[in-house]
Image (cartoon, helix red, strand yellow):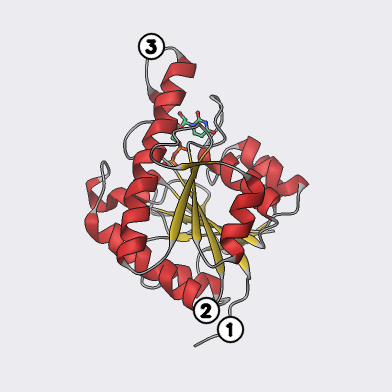
């Protein structure tokens, strides 16, 4: 087994990545495959915290005429559905897993407590952070940046539907330029669609490395953690 490059990681999984080819809802195979990938990391001694999105069910900013804050709270609830699905898949793979939510729902998950999360990671549990940061007008990418800073993580592993950062959508533009390395500043200045500017500037200001890759690629998470140059590295 290869040596891991990182000791503690924040794995950001977008909701869409969990939907697989269906684009919406949850795909059993993607859940199973993600759990096995995370198990591989845990078996290498890597501490894994997951931030999960909710775009496979709902996104506040595309909700039309609805009050934005209400729509965003709905989006945060969507991330909780994904968190419980991931917890189930992780536990089926033999991984002890805790879900911590930024909006209290203590009958089904723990509230977010930074010190408790760090303790659980040190005990070998996977910790899933759900409900974003608990405030509307933010995204789960910003949540990943914030939790990475709070947990003192070595990297954000940004598992996406696309396999890297491009200068335009590779599904629409066959000539889209693919990047292997970028700086945070380039992401911000060129307005690259990798994460929103709030998340990118939080990463820049706190010197958080971001490794972007496609979740559907074979062994993608393991390959990223063992230092293989898949996808795009932003630092
Ligand atoms: N959201 C929010 N505050 C947060 C995180 C998420 O309001 O701190 C809402 C927002 O409406 C967002 C939705 O939750 O559109 C789902 O999150 P996101 O779009 O980041 O999910 P992803 O695109 O990663 O699946």
Q: Which residue is mark 1?
A: 3
Q: Position of residue 104 (x, y in %)?
A: 49, 32
Q: Secondary structure at mark 2?
A: loop
Above or below for 56 versus 48: above
Say which of marks 2 and 3 sits in front: 2
Q: Position of residue 31 (x, y in %)?
A: 30, 58
Determine whether the beta carbon of the residue marked 2 sits less than 8 angstroms from the nearest atom of ligand 1.
no
Identify the residue at horizontal 61%, vertical 43% (top origin): 113
Q: Position of residue 232 (x, y in %)?
A: 56, 61
Tell me: 197 left or right of 18.
right
| CB atoms of marks 2 and 1 within 8 Å | yes
The crowding category of the residue bearing disc 3, from other C-alpha atoms within 10 Å (few below 14, some 14 to 19, many at least 20), is few
- Camera sees residue 190: no
The crowding category of the residue bearing disc 2, from other C-alpha atoms within 10 Å (few below 14, some 14 to 19, many at least 20), is some
Mark pair 3, 1: CA separation: 50 Å
- Image mark for residue 44: 2
**Snapshot quadrant of residue 197:** top right
Q: Position of residue 62 (x, y in %)?
A: 40, 25
Q: Secondary structure at mark 3?
A: loop
Identify the residue at horizontal 56%, vertical 41% (top origin): 112
Q: Which residue is mark 3?
A: 65
Say which of marks 2 and 1 sits in front: 2
Q: Secondary structure at mark 1?
A: loop
Q: Earlier in the sequence, mark 2 or mark 3?
A: 2
């Amino acid at each position: 087994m290869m040596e891991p490059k990182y000791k503690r990681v924040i794995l950001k999984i977008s909701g869409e990545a969990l939907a697989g080819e269906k684009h919406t809802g949850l795909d059993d195979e993607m859940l199973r495959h993600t759990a096995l990938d995370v198990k591989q990391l845990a078996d290498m001694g890597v501490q894994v915290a997951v931030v999960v999105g909710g775009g496979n069910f709902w996104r506040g900013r595309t909700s039309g005429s609805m009050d934005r804050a209400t729509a965003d709270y709905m989006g945060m609830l969507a991330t909780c559905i994904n968190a419980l699905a991931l917890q189930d898949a992780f536990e089926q793979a033999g991984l002890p897993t805790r879900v911590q939510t930024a909006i209290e729902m203590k009958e089904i998950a723990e509230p977010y407590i930074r010190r408790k999360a760090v303790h659980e990671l040190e005990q070998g549990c996977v910790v899933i952070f759900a409900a974003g940061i608990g405030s509307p007008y933010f995204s789960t990418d910003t949540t990943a940046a914030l939790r990475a800073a709070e947990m003192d993580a070595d990297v954000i592993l940004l598992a996406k539907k696309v396999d890297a950062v491009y200068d335009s959508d590779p599904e629409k533009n066959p000539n889209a330029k693919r990047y292997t390395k970028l700086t945070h500043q380039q992401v911000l200045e060129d307005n690259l669609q990798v994460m929103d500017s709030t998340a990118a500037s939080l990463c820049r200001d706190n010197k958080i490395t971001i490794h972007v890759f496609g979740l559907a690629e074979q062994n993608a998470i393991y390959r990223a953690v063992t230092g293989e140059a898949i996808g795009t590295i932003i630092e």
